[in-house]
Image (tube, grey):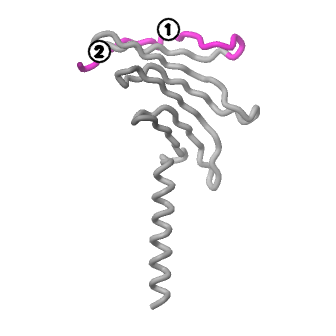
């Protein structure tokens, strides 16, 4: 009888541990996502690669919003394992006018040390009011 009670406690404890871990990060296939929210808006998300028993840095996304809680910018950094640091990769800016949104895409130019516009990826689309 004592063994059953201990086993039940072990199972319940394991469920609490797993549930607690899921409150901070979630996993999809080979990646683990760890979002950070402020006032109900996701402002950052770090993505880790799940390499079996270890997690390694993969990507980091940051987000900015306007006063209407519409995303105005997202920036992505990739992990450089050789340099052991985050490096800039892309920036996407969102401009709202009436019922349209224009999405402008930029790619980081390491040599120039700045983001460069990629005009062929700029799009404008209508959104529902």
Which quadrant of the figure contains the N terminus?
A: bottom left
Q: Residue at x 69, y 17 (%)?
A: 110
Q: Nearer the viewer, mark 2 or mark 1?
A: 2
Using the image, determine if residue 65 lies above or below residue 4.
above
Q: Residue 125: within the magenta?
A: yes
Q: Nearer the viewer, residue 52 or 48?
A: 48
Residue at far right of view:
82
| Mark closest to the chain's N terminus, 2 or 1 | 1
Where is mark 2, residue-wise? Answer: 126
Assign a secondary structure to mark 2. Answer: strand
- The span shown in magenta is 110-129
Q: Nearer the viewer, residue 19 or 112?
A: 19
Name the spot of residue 87 as percent of width and height, x first. Answer: 66, 26
User: In the visual, does 109 lie left or right of 30?
Assistant: right
Assign a secondary structure to mark 1. Answer: helix
Location of residue 126 (image quadrant): top left
Residue at far bottom of view:
1
Q: Residue at x 46, y 51 (%)?
A: 23
Q: Badge 2: how crowded within 10 Å, few (<14), some, or many (20+)? A: few
Using the image, determine if residue 36 lies above or below residue 19.
above
Name the spot of residue 100 as percent of width and height, x first. Answer: 31, 13
Q: Badge 1: how crowded within 10 Å, few (<14), some, or many (20+)? A: few
| Mark number, residue 119 | 1
Using the image, determine if residue 22 lies above or below residue 59.
below
Which quadrant of the figure contains the C terminus?
A: top left
């Amino acid at each position: 009888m004592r063994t059953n009670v201990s086993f039940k406690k072990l199972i319940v404890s394991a469920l609490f541990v797993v549930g607690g871990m899921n409150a901070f990060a979630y996993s999809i296939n080979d990646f683990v996502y760890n979002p950070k929210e402020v006032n109900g808006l996701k402002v950052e998300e770090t993505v880790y690669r799940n390499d079996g028993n270890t997690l390694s840095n993969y990507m980091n996304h940051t987000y900015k919003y306007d006063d209407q809680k519409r995303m105005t910018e997202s920036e992505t950094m990739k992990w450089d394992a050789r340099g052991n640091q985050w490096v800039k990769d892309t920036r996407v800016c969102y401009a709202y006018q009436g019922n349209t949104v224009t999405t402008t895409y930029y790619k980081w130019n390491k040599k120039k040390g700045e983001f460069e516009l990629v005009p062929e990826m700029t799009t404008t689309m209508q959104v529902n009011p």
